[in-house]
Amino acid sequence: MVTAVFAAFACSAPAHAQEGGDTDGFLSSLWNKTTFNALVRADFSYRTTSFQNPYNQNNMPFQDVDVPRQAYVPPALSTGLVNNALGVLGLPGLNIAQPLDWNVPIPGFSDTVKRSDFIPQNDTEYNYNTLRFTGEMDTKFTQNLRLNIRLRGIYDPEMYDLFDANDVSGLQGGIKGGGGDRYADTGKANLFEAKGRNGRNLNPLEIAGRNYMIDLPTFIVNYKTGPFDFRFGNQQIAWGQAIFFRTFDVANGLDYRRHLVIDRAIEEYEDERVSKIALRGTMQVTDTMIADGFVGKFQPDIVGNPNTPFNVVPAQFYRPLDNYYTGNYDTKIDYGIRMKADYGNWGYQAMAVRRYNPLGVFHWTESGINDGLYGGLLGNIVESAYALKLPNCGALYNPSTCRMYGSVGEALSHTPLTIAPAGVYSAKEWFSSAAGVRLDGFDMVNTIIKEYPALQDVFASEVQDPEQTAHLLNTFFLGAGGSIRGNVARDYYRENVFGVGGTYVTSADPSSFLDSIILNLEVQYTPQRAYTRPDLSSNPIKSDEFIFTAVAEKWYRYTQAFPAAYLVFQYQHRTDSDLVGLNLRGYGGNARNQEYRPSDGLGSADYFVFAGFQPTPNRKFIFEWAFLLDAEGGLLAQPNVRWNPGNDISVDLFYNYVDAGAWGSGRSTLQRAFDYADEVALRFTYTL
């Protein structure tokens, strides 16, 4: 699209000017003031261990394990209704003497389930493979006015076997649509599209298909006059320069679709920031003071789709329905200001930003999918019992004897649960998957039942402990005829973010390592920040958060034979959330050891970074490294060798080593979310 425009302009502009006989006219003058540059890049990463993404269909918890399931009599299902339903089906009635509390098994209704008997298997060797073109055009109309456009095109040749929902279309009616655009769930895994509930692109300046995307990360008009610098258009506003950390860098969200957060770390989120349409103005107030402010259209974080290599949302759930448009968040504005000043060896900065948190809050939502049960005899009993309840009881409604809807399927369409294959198949899988994404499998069930009365209408009732929860869940899975899929949505909350920071440059003997170290301290404070609850309630956690970041960086020349090395040490303390903004309350769950509920979570999180690079004397090679350490025991290590053979070619070879439990249990670390991602990565870049 824009590439073609660039090419056509490049080829035709001089000729057009010559045809008109005015080589010194407007077009030729404009051409002489325009520069073009571009690069092509190929990225590949190869998995070096047997571990695969545990949030995708081929590697779910208990994927290849036989798990027993037993059905129990629902307490909300009165004995009379049970016996009436059995009588309709010509079966003998039950004589239940003890009170019902998800403790009475239904004889003959049990089985053993293994997910791999239903879900096609694959073994993904590659984690990441893309081909990329980036082109940039800069036109300087006058001394004060210029236009800058950057186009990015990415294509994934799909050198991996992706899950296809069509492969399970013959089970439980297949993975169905409804309740919103289900573009990422009902066909082959979708690598790039990112849409709201209504089917519109979350990024308005992006064209994307299942395995390609084209966007304009930069499209700005820049005007400078005197001490003022104004930039209007689609842009990144990078107020922070830390590796892995974002304290002042709050203007833009992040795009996790491509290589999550384990791309080349030294790039400092250059490829991950989500551009926004904004007006940014910078003013040189004095020789030592700058004021920098912006007003821009709110743009959310973009998370990966189910069954893509770096997906972080369990694929037994539908992709979260994004309310960006249906909630009118696309009309919301973010704005903020930052002041920076220098005084000798000291520097100061402060910011105030009013924004919508781009990560948002995830919560249960109605599925909008009307489908009944596929559980054979047990499913027929439940549907018959439901049909025997009295319709339209009004004020006299009682879930044991009355019903609000015409069928079980209609009732379920008003709950977050959908009868479909490739969902959750057992209580053990439910608890384990929940713990893996820092959710509380026990509270999740009670929250659905309390917040969605339609679930009580189909005989669900609150549970008192994990054992009862397991009985309820397995009963529902058996009645469903296999598995049940969950439905969640994302909403966004406004917040005020304040920050202060100070910088000091040390002075010592010029030959000393202690000379010219840049020390930087940044503090962020956000009152009443909204977070996703571990039970996925629609009522988010709200708490005041403090983030403290300390950075020491230095250029140091070990020997005159080598250029100076760049070294940076970082530390960050967070009081309420982890490095990507998820609340710490859900940390600590481990259902594989029958610890069905997470601990009380973490009271705070601490992270350390050591990174840098060292060029060789001829700069043909650059050795880079980046280490991210979670104080709870997680490690991400990324050594990199960059080779510059000449002829505008560069080659990066780096390794991502991830260990969620370098020490400790590994249950309460950031790295737990991508512990599977040990890989060797190769990047080839050619600058045109």
Image: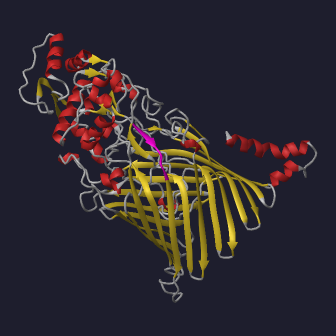
* Left or right, 599 with reference to 215: left
Does 196 appear above or below 390?
A: below
* Left or right, 323 with reference to 97: right
The residue closer to the viewer here, 477 or 531, is 531
Residue 276 in view (yes/no)? yes
The count of marks equals: 0
Query: Picture coordinates of residue 668 (x, y %)?
Result: 29, 56
The residue closer to the viewer here, 381 or 34, is 381
Quarter where residue 446 is shown? top left
State the quadrant of the N terminus.
top right
Query: Picture coordinates of residue 222 (x, y %)?
Result: 72, 56
Does 624 appear above or below 28?
A: below
**First to last magenta residue range:** 488-494
Whether 503 is among the magenta residues is no
| Residue in view at x 18 percent, y 15 percent | 85
* Left or right, 544 with reference to 510: left
Does 484 appear above or below 568?
A: above
Query: Picture coordinates of residue 290 (x, y %)?
Result: 65, 70
The residue closer to the viewer here, 98 or 102, is 98
Whether 490 is among the magenta residues is yes
- Considering the whole magenta stretch, tell me its main secondary structure: strand
Query: Picture coordinates of residue 581 (x, y %)?
Result: 42, 54
Residue 170 in view (yes/no)? no
The residue closer to the viewer here, 606 or 532, is 532
